[in-house]
Amino acid sequence: MKIILIGAQFSGKGTLAKKIARDFGFKHISPGDLFRENIKNGTEIGLLAKSYMDKGVLVPLEVTVEVIKNKLQSEECAGGFILDGFPRSKEQALALQEISDIDNVILLDVPLDEIKRRCLSRRVCPNCGEIYSTTTYSKPDCEKCNTPLIQRDDDNWESIKTRLEVYERETTPLINFYADRLFVVKGQDDPDATYEPVKNFLKGKLK
Ligand code: AMP
């Protein structure tokens, strides 16, 4: 199955995508992660992407589509995939149509004031990618691999505000674009409570 996950920053998209990937065996693909991997490896794409990411704006279409296309056409995605963070605009959705047919689109719906509350508390492990919130996890090191947790370079208020505006302007039109295959779920504080209806929906689709 080929799935797209849509949600604003801090809606819990990454966490939900990981649960779906774990239980259903679909490959989890996040352009943000792919770009960060390129930055870490010092590639040309990484260098270019970083200049946009630090400002909180979208990386140019051709670069993003190239990175995503290579991934979707790789063997890793043969058993299905869940796209987390792509497409983020109608032009990206049109480009994706040329690469793959999408079966289901999940919209993770979280009110703006809740997003604001969550945004400044996010910490990530630079080694294994685990995500934490300082409201529920107060230790300085990753629970899984003991690496000191960091705040992402682009997790600052100015950048976040820009990213939320970009989401509103560029990404919300996708709700209409994918209206014929859209499943809407309320994003709750408890990730398992958010996941439950999604799991049931996907199981129903696989029958
Ligand atoms: P994320 O990890 O999803 O918060 O994304 C971090 C940054 O990566 C974004 O602010 C963008 O600069 C870039 N990025 C992620 N997804 C996309 C996309 N679909 N198109 C263009 N740029 C993206």
Image (cartoon, rainbow, N blue to C red):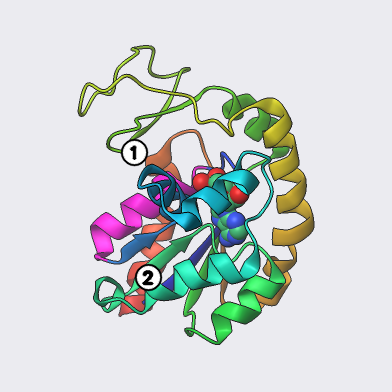
| Quadrant containing the C terminus in the rendered view | bottom left
Give the crowd class for mark 2: few <14, some 14-19, many >=20 residues within 10 Å.
some
Q: CA distance from mark 1 to mark 2?
A: 19 Å
Label 2, secondary structure: give it: helix
Q: Which residue is mark 2?
A: 71
Check disc 1 and report the residue beneath it. 129
Please tell me whether residue 72 belongs to the stretch shown in magenta.
Answer: no
Residue type indicated by callout 2: Lys
Q: Please name the amino acid that badge 1 sits on.
A: Gly
Observer-nearest of 120 and 207: 120
Tell which of 79 and 38 is nearer to you: 38
Which quarter of the figure has residue 24? bottom left
Classify residue 119 as left or right of residue 150.
Answer: right
Q: From which residue to which does the magenta span run?
A: 12-25
The answer to which image quadrant residue 54 occupies is top right
Is residue 6 in view?
yes
Q: Is mark 1 within 8 Å of ligand 1?
A: no
Main SS of the magenta segment?
Answer: helix
Q: Quadrant of the N terminus?
A: bottom left
Density class for disc 1 (Cα within 10 Å; few <14, some 14-19, many ≥20) is few
Q: How many numbered marks have been drawn onto this rendered protein structure? A: 2
Q: Quadrant of residue 146?
A: top left
Percent across and percent down for residue 204 are 36, 73
> Compared with residue 166, is residue 139 higher up or lower down, i.e. above or below?
above
